[in-house]
Amino acid sequence: MQPRSVRPAGTWHLVRHALLLLAFALPAVDACADEKPYAPESIPGAVIVSAEEVVELILTRKDLVIVDSRKKPEYSKGHIEGAISLLNTSMRRETFEAMCPDKTAPIVFYCNGVRCLRSSDAIQKAMDWGYRNVFWFRGGWKEWSDKRLPAIAE
């Protein structure tokens, strides 16, 4: 009996198998990237406002506080004029109360839009600390920039 030539077992089969796995895995990875959770439809005690209503609040309420709950690099690229950069995960009661001692002052919170949970988290914290005049710009930066409203960049 003659020895058969030895080559790695199933090399082509392994390559083909790996390519098939990639072909099916990549769309799933891409789909997961687009599957960010939606912000809640509402937050009890918070008033949802549109971009136009935020503009109206800015023009009519001199005591308005605007909180941008996005990360610093996002804020630096563009934000609503007068907005304070305060990442929801960095928000501490003492700091927030020092920044906004009047718990009846109107406060607008926003982040990146309906696929961002930062502002809803920040609102919940503020409300837990006794703030009651809370507005949620749920459409956030996406709505603001889509409507080409004025922005400040640093």
Image: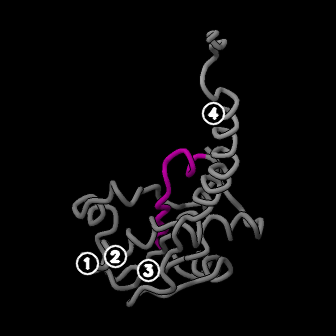
Is the residue marked by circle 3 packed among few (<14), some (14-19), or many (20+) residues within 10 Å? some
Q: Is residue 147 above or below residue 1?
A: below
Residue at the disc numbered 2: 124
Q: Earlier in the sequence, mark 3 or mark 4?
A: 4
**Residue 60 on the magenta segment:** no
Quarter the N terminus occupies: top right
Find out whether residue 72 is within the magenta segment: yes
Q: Residue 94 sits in which quadrant?
A: bottom left
Q: Which mark is residue 14?
A: 4
What is the distance, in whole Å, between disc 1 and disc 3 at their CAs? 16 Å
Residue 143 x %, y %: 68, 71
Q: Secondary structure at mark 3?
A: loop
Residue that appears at 76% across and 70% down: 147
Q: Amino acid at mark 1?
A: Asp
Residue underneath mark 1: 128
Q: Are marks 3 and 2 in contact (CB under 8 Å)?
A: no
Q: Nearer the viewer, residue 120 or 7?
A: 7
Whether label 2 touches label 1, CB < 8 Å: yes
